[in-house]
Amino acid sequence: MPTRGRLVPRQPWAIKRTTPTALHHEGIYIAKYIHGDIGITSY
Protein backbone atom coordinates (compact mmCIF):
# COMPACT_ATOMS: atom_id res chain seq x y z
CA MET A 1 0.00 0.00 0.00
CA PRO A 2 1.22 3.53 -0.76
CA THR A 3 0.60 4.71 2.80
CA ARG A 4 2.86 1.99 4.24
CA GLY A 5 5.94 3.61 2.75
CA ARG A 6 5.54 6.63 5.00
CA LEU A 7 6.04 4.46 8.09
CA VAL A 8 9.61 3.69 7.00
CA PRO A 9 12.07 6.62 7.07
CA ARG A 10 13.68 6.77 3.64
CA GLN A 11 15.14 9.37 1.33
CA PRO A 12 12.86 10.31 -1.61
CA TRP A 13 15.46 9.00 -4.09
CA ALA A 14 15.63 5.68 -2.24
CA ILE A 15 11.88 5.16 -2.56
CA LYS A 16 12.03 5.60 -6.34
CA ARG A 17 15.02 3.28 -6.66
CA THR A 18 13.48 0.57 -4.47
CA THR A 19 12.88 -2.60 -6.47
CA PRO A 20 9.98 -5.03 -5.98
CA THR A 21 12.56 -7.63 -4.96
CA ALA A 22 13.83 -5.40 -2.16
CA LEU A 23 10.28 -4.82 -0.96
CA HIS A 24 9.66 -8.57 -1.14
CA HIS A 25 12.68 -9.37 1.04
CA GLU A 26 11.75 -6.58 3.45
CA GLY A 27 8.25 -8.04 3.70
CA ILE A 28 9.67 -11.47 4.49
CA TYR A 29 11.91 -10.01 7.20
CA ILE A 30 8.98 -8.17 8.80
CA ALA A 31 6.80 -11.28 8.53
CA LYS A 32 9.46 -13.41 10.25
CA TYR A 33 9.90 -10.82 13.00
CA ILE A 34 6.16 -10.62 13.67
CA HIS A 35 5.80 -14.42 13.48
CA GLY A 36 8.69 -14.88 15.91
CA ASP A 37 7.21 -12.34 18.31
CA ILE A 38 3.82 -14.08 18.24
CA GLY A 39 5.50 -17.46 18.77
CA ILE A 40 7.30 -16.20 21.88
CA THR A 41 4.25 -14.56 23.44
CA SER A 42 1.94 -17.51 22.70
CA TYR A 43 3.79 -19.82 25.10
Image: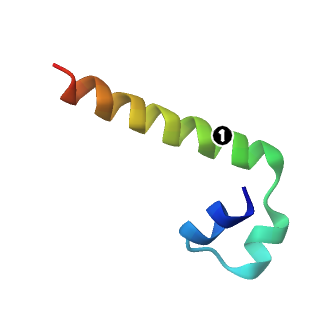
Q: Position of residue 10 (x, y in %)?
A: 63, 74
> Dot 1, how many residues are within 10 Å of its Cα: few (below 14), some (14-19), or many (20+)?
few
- Three-letter amino acid code of the residue under disc 1: His
Q: Residue at x 67, y 66 (%)?
A: 3
Quarter of the figure with residue 5? bottom right
The one nearer the camera, 28 or 2, is 2
Q: Determine whether, in the image, residue 23 is placed left or right of residue 38.
A: right
Q: Return the residue found at the far bottom.
A: 12
From the top left corner, tell me how far across and down residue 4 is, in percent: 63, 61
Residue that lies at the very extreme toward the top in this rendered image: 43
Say left or right for 38 vs 1: left
Q: Secondary structure at mark 1?
A: helix
Question: What is the x, y in percent for residue 15?
Answer: 76, 69
Task: Classify residue 24 by image quadrant.
Answer: top right
The relative height of residue 23 versus residue 7 in the rendered view (above or below) is: above
Q: Quadrant of residue 18?
A: bottom right
Query: What residue would you read off at disc 1?
Result: 25
The image shows residue 11, relative to residue 21, as above or below, that is: below
Give the number of callouts. Answer: 1
Front one among 41 and 11: 41
- Residue furthest to the left: 43
Q: Is 41 displayed left or right of 22 in the figure?
A: left
User: Could you tell me which residue is drawn at 21 percent across and 23 percent down?
Assistant: 42
* Quarter containing the C terminus: top left
Please name the residue shown 74% across and 63% down the image: 2
Q: Judge left or right: residue 29 versus residue 22.
A: left
Residue depicted at 46% across the width and 32% down the height: 32
The chosen color scheme is: rainbow
